[in-house]
Image (cartoon, coloured by chain):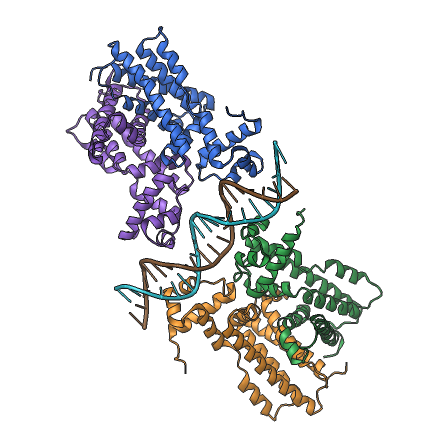
Chain colours: A blue, B purple, C green, D orange, E cyan, F brown
Amino acid sequence: MKPSLSTKQLQLLDTAESLFSQKGFDGTSVRDIAEAAGINTAMISYYFGSKEKLMEEIFERKSLNIKEKVANLLKDDSLNPLEKMYSLVDMYIEGILSRKTFHRILLCEQIINQNPSIITMLDKMKTKNSEYINDLIRLGQRKGLFKKNIDIPMMTNTLIGTVSHTLVNLDFYKTYHHMEGLKDEEFERVVKKRLSVHIKNIYKAILTHES
Amino acid sequence: MKPSLSTKQLQLLDTAESLFSQKGFDGTSVRDIAEAAGINTAMISYYFGSKEKLMEEIFERKSLNIKEKVANLLKDDSLNPLEKMYSLVDMYIEGILSRKTFHRILLCEQIINQNPSIITMLDKMKTKNSEYINDLIRLGQRKGLFKKNIDIPMMTNTLIGTVSHTLVNLDFYKTYHHMEGLKDEEFERVVKKRLSVHIKNIYKAILTHES
Amino acid sequence: MKPSLSTKQLQLLDTAESLFSQKGFDGTSVRDIAEAAGINTAMISYYFGSKEKLMEEIFERKSLNIKEKVANLLKDDSLNPLEKMYSLVDMYIEGILSRKTFHRILLCEQIINQNPSIITMLDKMKTKNSEYINDLIRLGQRKGLFKKNIDIPMMTNTLIGTVSHTLVNLDFYKTYHHMEGLKDEEFERVVKKRLSVHIKNIYKAILTHES
Amino acid sequence: MKPSLSTKQLQLLDTAESLFSQKGFDGTSVRDIAEAAGINTAMISYYFGSKEKLMEEIFERKSLNIKEKVANLLKDDSLNPLEKMYSLVDMYIEGILSRKTFHRILLCEQIINQNPSIITMLDKMKTKNSEYINDLIRLGQRKGLFKKNIDIPMMTNTLIGTVSHTLVNLDFYKTYHHMEGLKDEEFERVVKKRLSVHIKNIYKAILTHES
DNA sequence: GATGAATGAGGGTTCATTCAT
DNA sequence: GATGAATGAACCCTCATTCAT
């Protein structure tokens, strides 16, 4: 069991997360983080052991863990398989967009991938998430509601890829649709809604339409 | 007019591109690059002026330029608008997957974004590419073949997002579908084909189906 | 308010001053300084920010500040103007020869002059010092003791120029007068005395004689 | 016998002299010189063997050689000893101010002094010049026109020191006397004249006055 | 528990020079 | 005779971390 973190440590994690998302892991020095957090440079090694361990801590705390939610989803008899997929889509949209900063880091780190500990974490996460979607889609197929021959990872790629690419180009999206005047929360609400409709349309088409 | 680069310089660019895609810009030292390329460390400054300029050179040479191709596409009377969209989809798939290394760099850099020169390049590219897709979709709408109320940037997000996320998770995709035995080129051919079918299905559904 | 410097920092300043005076600013590397001072190379940036800032610190600490002394001199009713000039001459001789090392640096830097911060410091110093001599000479002129038409900057040039050139050629002077046997302090005492007599003679002649 | 230098080499020497006088020897790179002279960087090593040898060449060509002139001066029966000293003063003023650029280099290098070859050159020069002044003053003393107990090196220090310090502070002198409007040659003429009168007054006072 | 001083390694870049042509 | 490419060393500085307090 890990010891729980103090307020200062949590605040330090937030500061680091913010800087990592702007300048990358290698582009952010422990001095940058310490200065931005208003603490002594030595504290980062002191609190977390090293800069790498700090990053790992961020990943451990922020990694999406949809296990429980999906388990509930699978058991929920009030929803048909397509509705369950819809629910899953919304869970991902919410999970990614409400962790914008962290997800930007994740997008880089899964490419650059230098820290073995993080590689392991990411691999586990991908596998887990994939299994849940598998279960959900197979359920729909068994019930004859979804088509056969679904390329399941490709479904995931479209779901996560679309949300991620939207996240990275949020500013462009805002400008394109002339929503510069909207408050941040309002804009985020709109984006989530549109992503939801957009991806659900796609999922419905792929899962149920004749091709 | 820029002077054309020597064979050695071009080889250096490839080496650097490869390292940047694996370890990121900040995670790659000029000594790393020079060693991998078998040249003297000083040559990087000598050839390109600086590590940053080297990166810019990579971007300038590898940035997708689909301008001409799309122009031809728009004029081509033998294709209907949906076929034109299909063709565009294939152009993007081909453009990204045939530049895998560079595209991995791009995915990180558009998030981290420290180099103003590269920011400018990326912004131009995004705007250009967006305009072409706009033109294509509006053409289909005028002809009454595409639905109204298409969220065009969201279409792009799904296209590029899906391809990018597939690119980043190629290994996972290969393992999932038990294609470890395939040769690289064979596997790439399969992936491109599946991406093509997958995204065209999506585009057809969004552009033409009733929701 | 600047933080006061530690013993180590002060010792480092002395070491650097000595090396700069022997090999010049550009001819002295931070490694040279660190090695001579027996500290880690990184400490120079750590203590002073940069090699340039280190030089500025030397200048700030060693620049002649004769302001107060001259102010007292002007007010002192027990001395006539010529005696005041004599006193000023001794102040300069003492000020330069007791800072031999620093003054050698200054002689080079006011020619080479690359550091804007030091340029500013030197300009201020020159202007200040010039004003005081002005005041002193004008006082003598008003009292009818000094001739009119004194070329005041030329007086300064002779004062500082003679002392500086003596400083630079101290070894030659020692050899010429066969004073190799003298202890350093003894020799310095003799030089100061002779400079004092020599320049006072000159000043008396220029300020009071008919030409 | 040294081979004579080509036009390009001479022009290179001038360029180098100018840069050395502005930024010092160590502060000037061979690239700086080559660029300013519009030639290839490798040419400096090619022409002169090394950067150091280039500097030596500058010194050899520009070092004051007053030997012959002073010899003539000593023999000249039409001038009395004081007039001969006056003539010597003018020779130095002219010699220094007409080689402003080189003399600025010399002022630094005789302090920094890293190049043994230049040290030797400077030592020879100092000794030679000192001997000539010695001869001249002793002549005046034998004729009973000059006082005994003249500190001859101190005379030299005042002569060269005053001229040098004037040279280094030319801009200040120009501003002080509101001569900004003067053309360069005009201003130089004025300065030489004033230096001449000033130092001759000093020399006359020291050599002939009762103290 | 927390800090500022101090460290050795390594960062990107520039240096004077040499080499092949 | 002259050049542009190439080199290894050195440049100043910043890095993440550790140490003594």
- Above or below residue C108? Residue D157 is below
Q: Nearer the viewer, residue B44 or D38?
A: B44
- Above or below residue C179? Residue C74 is above
Q: Residue furthest right?
A: C78
Q: Residue furthest left?
A: B78
Q: Residue B4 at x, y = what percent?
A: 28, 52
Which image quadrant is residue C82 in? bottom right
From the viewer's perspective, is D83 left or right of D3? right
From the viewer's perspective, is A207 left or right of C147? left
Q: Residue B45 at x, y = what percent?
A: 38, 52
- Above or below residue B77? Residue D165 is below
Q: Residue D118 at x, y = what percent?
A: 51, 74
Query: What's the residue at 47%, 63% (across, down)?
Result: D28
Which image quadrant is residue C71 in? bottom right
Query: What's the residue at 58%, 88% (across, down)?
Result: D73
Q: Nearer the viewer, residue D137 or D54?
A: D54
Whether residue A115 is visible, yes or no, is yes
Q: Nearer the viewer, residue D26 or B184?
A: B184
